Image (cartoon, rainbow, N blue to C red):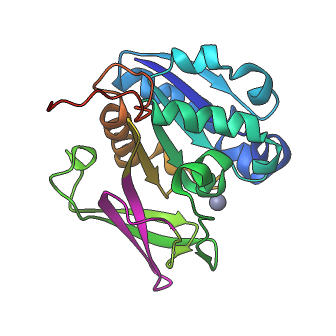
Amino acid sequence: MNIVIYNEYRHERTEPACAEVYPNGIHAVLADFLKKGIDCNIKTFCIDDVNEKMTDEVLNDTDVILWWGHMAHNEVTDETAKRVADHVNKGMGAIFLHSGHHSKPFRLLMGTAPNLSWTHNGFKEIIWTIDTTHPVAQGIPPYFELPMEEVYGEPFDIPAPDALVFIGWYSSGHVFRSGCAFKRGRGKIFYFQPGHETYPTYKNETVQKVILNAVNWVNPAIEKGQVNSGIDVEPIIK
Ligand code: ZN
């Protein structure tokens, strides 16, 4: 499997609280457990090179992309965002993590803002497995706990997901659709809410298992290709 990780990689280089948790960047932790769990090649991009180097050629060879961004969403060009969204429509799998909900490619693919109710950092989160039959939920316990996460609250302005796999509850009282599965064109998308940059969420083994499951689920089961344009279709009944 050919995997691309986009991690903005700016918090880690500017904020000591983040550098302490992810000294080599969030992408390094993601790449490390992905390599252990899946036979794969991984390419990583950050805000410094994504617009220049994440080309059509790279995305043609990509089965699954993971996207973590936050403070520099607007520095990802519209062309780059469209390129990513186009490839998802053609079959590339995509996983948007945490604040990736506001990234340009995710906005394009959802067709909404998609805003949420932000309240506070630093509450306990319990993640409940709702759709136990979904491939992303396999091997995940009925619930698991993260001692500290950023509170993302409903309403979350996304189109209704094709499957709601996880719901997060916070000790602040808020709830959130924390694990959402979508299909767009020929591609599959998974959004997973946990992963604030100052908490060691991506070092949690259950979180890693969810992301590994998600990578396997969005991995295109069919050959990637052109989206059906809907033209030049001969009548099948004459
Ligand atoms: Zn955050």
Whether residue 21 is visible, yes or no, is yes
Where does residue 216 sit, x and y in percent of width and height? 32, 32
Residue 37's x, y, as percent? 35, 25
- Which is more toward the observer, 59 or 29? 59
- Point out the image quarter for the N terminus: top left
Task: Describe residue 92's horizontal placement relative to residue 195 as left or right.
Answer: left
Residue drawn at 78 percent across, 53 percent down: 71
- From the viewer's perspective, tell me whether residue 14 is left or right of residue 70: right
Quarter of the image with the C terminus is: top left
- The main secondary structure of the magenta stretch is strand
Read off the magenta span: 158-181
| Drawn side of residue 136 relative to residue 175, left or right | left
Point out residue 130 in the picture as x, y percentages from the top left corner.
Answer: 24, 65
Q: Residue furthest bottom?
A: 173
Rendering quarter of residue 168: bottom left
Q: In the displayed structure, would residue 143 be above or below residue 54?
A: below
The tally of labels here is 0
Residue 196 visible here: no
Q: Residue furthest front?
A: 238
The quarter of the rendering in which ligand 1 is drawn is bottom right
Q: Quadrant of residue 98?
A: bottom right
Q: Is 7 placed above or below 56 here?
A: below
> Is 229 in the magenta?
no
Residue shown at the point (51%, 79%) measured from the top left? 155
Q: Position of residue 131 (x, y in %)?
A: 21, 60
